[in-house]
Amino acid sequence: MRSGASVASGGISKRGDRVLRTAFYLAALSRMRVNPLIKDYAAFKRSRGFRGRELVVVCARKLARVVWYKNEPFKY
């Protein structure tokens, strides 16, 4: 995404632990169907035009932010 002269990128970067990224991706797949927080977030993002794998990555990033913020195991 571009805004003037700055360039911002979203999503999960390819830096860091590959296993952890995969775990967040797979967790987001299941949480999108079960967890109300992630389910509502996915519906919101779907209304904004996100589809398929891109939608799962956005939800995985949201899940990672929630876990990082709370600094405790994520409960559904």
Image (cartoon, grey):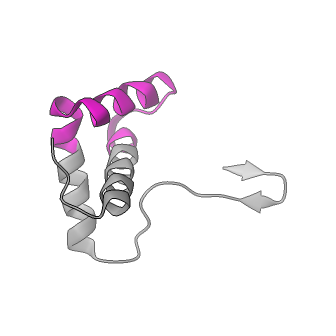
The spot of residue 23 in percent (x, y) is: 19, 61
Q: How many marks?
A: 0
Residue that appears at 47% across and 22% down: 47
The spot of residue 63 in percent (x, y) is: 31, 50
Q: Given the current orientation, which residue lies at the most extreme bottom position? A: 16
Residue 49 appears left or right of 36: right
Residue that appears at 30% across and 36% down: 38
User: Is residue 53 shown in magenta?
Assistant: yes
Residue that appears at 40% across and 70% down: 14
Residue 76 appears left or right of 25: left
Residue 32 appears left or right of 59: left
Depth check: 69 or 64 in front?
A: 69
Assign the magenta stretch its main secondary structure: helix
Residue that appears at 44% across and 66% down: 13
Q: Is residue 76 above or below residue 70?
A: above
Which image quadrant for residue 59?
A: top left
Q: Given the current orientation, which residue lies at the most extreme top position? A: 47
Depth check: 72 or 29 in front?
A: 72
Q: Is residue 43 above or below residue 2?
A: above
User: What is the quadrant of the C terminus in the image?
Assistant: top left
The spot of residue 49 in percent (x, y) is: 49, 28
Which image quadrant for residue 68?
A: bottom left
The span picked out in magenta is 29-56
